[in-house]
Amino acid sequence: MSPKEAKELISSLFTEEGAEISGIKIAAESPLRFEIVKNADESITINFVDNKPKASVKRIFTISATVVSITLKDEHGFFELKNFPSIPFPYDGFFSSSADGADISSIQQIIDTKYCGEKKKIANLCLFYADEWAKISSQATCFKTATAQQKRKLKKQCVDFVAHNVKKEMEDKYGSVILTYLLVFIIIPTVCKFIVYKLLEKYFD
């Protein structure tokens, strides 16, 4: 990469569209502050201090997460994304778009029979985001060999990620003023936790 190409890439980080690298868009607000640390194993970690960048990938909906840090090793790197396990990436690409997921048809059937109206829409959103989270995270961790403590952490990360994105989807659709206390603090968290736990059972088993 030439100095001019590097400047254009960095400049594009601060645009509304962000910089696109291997299908992943990275966007940030200026000024972007970070610290660079050389680790004991000779790897380099870039810690973002504030105005942390956002990484996003387009699926049916846009999946996005805050970039906490990036670690660069000789052969590959690691993303530290908020509410995700550490995600490895090769230098010729980022997230794999072909990660195999679990069969979610039985969960879809539960949603169809258990929920109706707005709750059903929320449950379907929860399933979508949870499924995408699990596909991405499966590239970073082996669910089947996770300890009890690791399972608790993974569940919390997934619930937090899904709840955040579902609330954002609902706000974008209806406006934050219309979202009631019951919807934001009772219905979405309850439905989200139920769907996430059902899905992760399939990955842990």
Image (tube, helix red, strand yellow):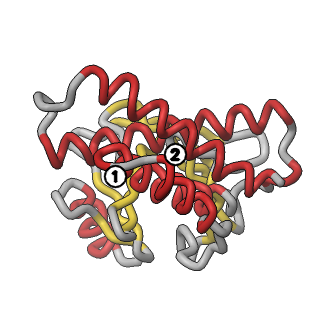
The three-letter code of the residue at mark 2 reads Leu
Dot 1 falls on a residue whose secondary structure is helix
Label 2's element?
strand
**Looking at the figure, which quarter contains the C terminus?**
bottom right
106 with respect to 65 (left or right): right
One can see residue 72 in this view: no
Pointer 2 and pointer 1: residues touching (CB < 8 Å)?
no
In which quadrant is the N terminus drawn? bottom left
Numbered tag placed on residue 81 in the rendering? 2
Report the number of numbered marks.
Answer: 2
Q: Residue at x 23, y 39 (%)?
A: 31
Identify the amino acid type marked 1.
Lys
| 39 with respect to 82 (left or right) | right
Image x and y of residue 81, in percent:
52, 45
Question: Where does the image place residue 47, in percent across and percent down from the top left?
Answer: 50, 38
Tell me: residue 131, above or below residue 145. Answer: below
Give the x, y percent position of residue 193. 55, 36
First in sequence, mark 2 or 1: give its number.
2
Taking the spot 47% from the left edge, 38% from the top edge, the residue there is 191
The residue singled out by tag 1 in the image is 121
Distance in Å between CA atoms under marks 2 and 1: 27 Å
Task: Name the residue at 25% across, 61% down.
Answer: 18
Mark drawn on residue 188: none
Note whether residue 3 is visible.
Answer: yes
Image point (56%, 46%), residue name: 195
Query: 114 or 2, which lies in front?
Result: 114
